[in-house]
Image (tube, helix red, strand yellow):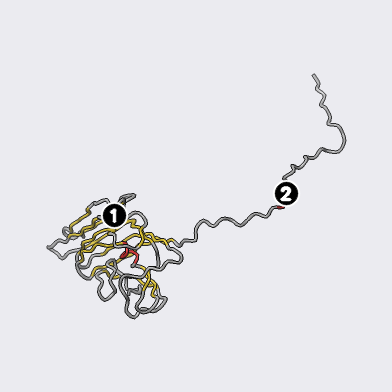
Amino acid sequence: MNQTRRKRPQGPSRKRNPRQGDNMTQQVIPHPPQIQDYTVRHSTRLRFTTNAAAAVAVTFQNLLDTILVASTALAPYDLFYAVKVRRVEVWADAAAGTAVTVSLLFDGNVAGIVGDQKAHTDTSMGIQPAKINAKPSPRSLASNYQVSSNAVAFTLSVPTGAVVDVELSFISSFGTGVAAQNASVGAAAGALCVRGLDGLAVAATKFIAPPLLAQI
């Protein structure tokens, strides 16, 4: 059965009538995109070697004092405003026939948010060094961003010659300058420098940074 296709009537094609708001929308100049964050954020691993046995309560002030900017020869300032701990690793070797022990405790105690109180420890045996690889539990004191204070992030006990790595995340704050707890000697103004986990200047610290870094 043949079907006859209906032909469209000849004539001018119908165009869609623009909506009233179309022309107005095309004329509006969009505003610049929102800037989500100007904050400088930095995550890194810092390495230190001990030149003497150390048993130290590492505070958040100590951690923020690890990366400094020298304003004068004697007055270093923290580069960052807040810090949190992601991980701590420790290695320590002993002379043949002896043993060494390393210990780490996330024992911070601040009302409302505390450390997990877990004690991590290991002892060397034979040719194997003592080794700790630990991170604070989520939502504990050390695993959250903290500003410079005397609150304890973790307590560390290590022998001479231990290698200590700390993985840290930093954030900056505009318009805020926090001085390091101890003065430097002979630093070059404007220089970026490091400091040991005990917060002491290079002449007194037990935590030595890699030799290519400027430690003050």
Q: Residue drawn 33% across and 67% down?
A: 66
Which residue has dot 2 on it? Answer: 24
Q: Measured from the top left, where is residue 159 in percent x and y?
A: 19, 65
Type of the residue with mark 1: Val
Q: Measured from the top left, where is residue 165 in percent x and y?
A: 30, 62
State whether residue 69 appears in this view: yes
> Are discs 1 and 2 less than 8 Å apart at CB?
no
Mark 1 element type: strand
Pointer 2 local density, CA inside 10 Å: few below 14, some 14–19, many at least 20: few
Type of the residue with mark 2: Met
Mark 2 element type: helix
Q: Quadrant of the N terminus?
A: top right
Tag shown at residue 5 = none
Q: Nearer the viewer, residue 158 or 82?
A: 82
Q: Quadrant of the C terminus?
A: bottom left
Q: Marks 1 and 2, Cα distance to the nearest angstrom?
A: 58 Å
Give the foreground label among 1 and 2: 1
Q: Measured from the top left, where is residue 22 in percent x and y?
A: 72, 46
Q: Residue furthest left?
A: 97
Q: Is residue 101 left or right of residue 17?
A: left
- When asked about the image quadrant of residue 100, the answer is bottom left
Comes first in the chain, label 1 or label 2: 2
Q: Measured from the top left, where is residue 213 in percent x and y?
A: 35, 72
Q: Residue drawn 32% across and 76% down?
A: 184
- When asked about the image quadrant of residue 17, the answer is top right
> Number of labelled discs?
2
Which residue has dot 1 on it? Answer: 110
